[in-house]
Image: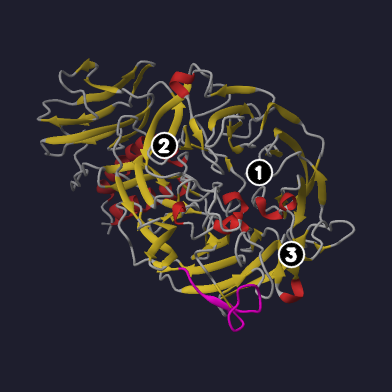
Amino acid sequence: MINYSVASTKILQFLVLFLCIIPWIYCLDNMMNVLTRGFSNYRNNYNAKESILSAANVNVNMFGKLFARPVKGEIYAGILIVNQVDTPKGIRNVMYVTTTSNNVYAFDADDPDDNEPIWQINLGPNAPISDNQFGNLCTEGTGAFTDFLWEVGIISTPVIDELSQTMFVVAMNKDSSHPFVYKHRLHALDIRTGEAKRAPVIIEGSLAGTGVGNINNRVEFQSAIQLQRTSLTLHQQTIIIAFAAFCDSGPYHGWVFGYDANTFQQKFIWNTSPNQQYGGIWQSGVGAAVDDSGYIYLKTGDGSFDPNEGSFGNTLVKLRIDETSNSLAVVDYFAPKYNQGGDYWDMKADFGSGGCIIPWPGSKILLCGSKHGEFFVVDQDNLGKLNMTADNVIQSWEGAQGWEMGPQVFWSDQDFSYIWTEFDRMKQFKFYRNGNRGLFDTTPYALSSMNAKSGGMIALSSSDNSLENGIVWATHAIENQGTPKPGMLRVFSAKNIATEIYNSNQNEPRDELGYYAKFNQPVPVNGRVYVATFAADSNVNCFATVYGHLKPRIVNMFPNEATLQLNGRSSVSLTVRATGFKGLTYQWYMNNEPMQGQTNQVLEVVNLRSNSNFFCRVTNQYGSTDSKIVAILKQPDIAPQQSNPIPEKSTLIIPSKSSNGTSSITWKSTLLFTLLLFILQLLL
């Protein structure tokens, strides 16, 4: 039987708790994790939840470089972000960086003065370019392999499974010098500590075929020939790993492997040309796109084309995982009309130079480009196959002067697409929807004022449907500067990219980017922009560089409650986490008076004599920001029937993960959890 007097007291307690938790729920709901390249398996490179940075508050006076973290090795892989991770340093928002030296780093994503990694591990010896044992056929065996300057290790962007707190990453290792032996390995790392969750698995296998390099009608995967640049994809608890070749050299093929994310059991192998040759999958590092029905889309590069022989060079393929037979099957394909069949080879027409994107959830189209400078709107339900006269697609047009070597971006709230190809200006196109499909106006809506020889690596962020708030973020190499090339971060109004609102050379001593990172786009999320850079030589560190608002900003407080009750305890800890330009200082206040000597991120409240209010003021050369006020009550205003002490680190993290790889903490799930706790307490 329910005691209604007790119940009414508990109802009042719940209402107080609920009113306190609402602002915190809103804050968490707007924190975004970046678990894969392009923000989701749609690969549309659009963060629709950026509530802090807007076109109105990004300028050289308010925004700039906050800090940079040195790493060993070049950063080809995209930077990933996970919030509220329980690390050896405590609860942190974490930035994950991987390099060609096979190093994996976890850094605090916010604190400009926390220079040391939370953790760092190495995944074994990398493959030095000086070996001249892989990729050297690019220049007929001379060893002048220049795609990578010093070494090959981790090249592709890892993928993170938030629910299991696991990062999946592929590293290339040199196992032996006598003879030379190279292997690719798939690793599973705990994102909290960096520890291996299971033993790594060697990526290997063979298929029946008479194609180039076969031995006794078996085509075997060879790590010394195959390059793993395409970002990893997590789909149906399967890790999808695609391969091209080092500089298109050697008797190579395109390969796709699938491994069970929980056991590392190999589920399938697929080869793009088992009875012929070539057809590598590289996509400038972009991962496979996955639609709402679970179909997988990948583009191949130059190579043999004969679907009857299972060869799909210069082709967009639609694939399906068959869980019954543990295989990967081709469902449909599209080959541009310039694909003449046979062993078509034209470096300028490489259809696989960039990945396709799915522009919005529920759409039935793919947006694809190519080195040819041609853009395509492809119907997901009928890709179009090969028509030598006219491409059987929804729309195609010559939209660029240069090669597509980077990501397309689609702003689904405003129906704009952005692309920045080599030797060209960035272009903005207007899209007109017709149900879940539509057409582009092929005349550019707007152009950037500058041309970039390297093209631009771009991403987009916005906080709402407002046309005024969207931002296009871009990095590109500065022309005529040699290799590696110095780079710039540029920021444009997504409303009209003719308007540049910031660039890193406006205050070069403070904001200089450093050397441009090839195929690596900026990552705008949670009020900061994460950018990778290269280095001038192998003896100098590369950097993961973080831009954001210069004035301090409070990231979070622990505990999260606005009111704490001591309930007989003698002490409680308060912790503030902040970001901003380096050199942050902290001053705690009690009842609006500064507390002498309390100038750290953590405040220990000991032997409190009366109810008091506390907050922290964080300061740097650009200003000050106050944290929220926390009221600590020596005695509760309403004595509960049974006391439940508040833990000193109080967090409530409920991940909600969509079917397409995006992740956030939703207010609905948090509210439901709070209600369930209340009902349980009421019934006890």
Above or below, 594 relative to 16 = above
Closer to the N terminus: mark 3 or mark 1?
Answer: 3
At a point 85% along the width and 62% down the height, the residue shown is 387
Measuring from the top left, give residue 510's x and y in whole percent: 44, 20
**Residue behind mark 1:** 408
Horizontal side, residue 340 vs residue 461: left or right: right
The quadrant of the image that shows the N terminus is bottom left
The quadrant of the image that shows the C terminus is bottom left
Amino acid at pointer 3: Tyr
**Residue behind mark 3:** 333
Above or below, 606 relative to 662 = above
Cα distance between the residues tagged 2 and 3: 40 Å
Q: Residues within 10 Å of mark 3 (few under 14, many from 20)?
A: many
Q: Disc 2 or disc 1, which is closer to the eye?
A: 2
Cα distance between the residues tagged 3 and 1: 20 Å
Q: Residues within 10 Å of mark 1 (few under 14, many from 20)?
A: many
Amino acid at pointer 2: Phe
Q: Residue furthest bottom?
A: 216
- Asked whether the viewer can see residue 188, the reply is yes
Q: Is residue 223 magenta?
A: no
**Residue behind mark 2:** 543
Measuring from the top left, give residue 197's x and y in whole percent: 33, 63
Q: Secondary structure at mark 3?
A: strand
- Asked whether the viewer can see residue 356, the reply is no
At a point 18% along the width and 23% down the height, the residue shown is 598
Part of the protein shown in magenta = 203-218
Could you say which disc has been placed on residue 117 in the image?
none
Q: Secondary structure at mark 2?
A: strand
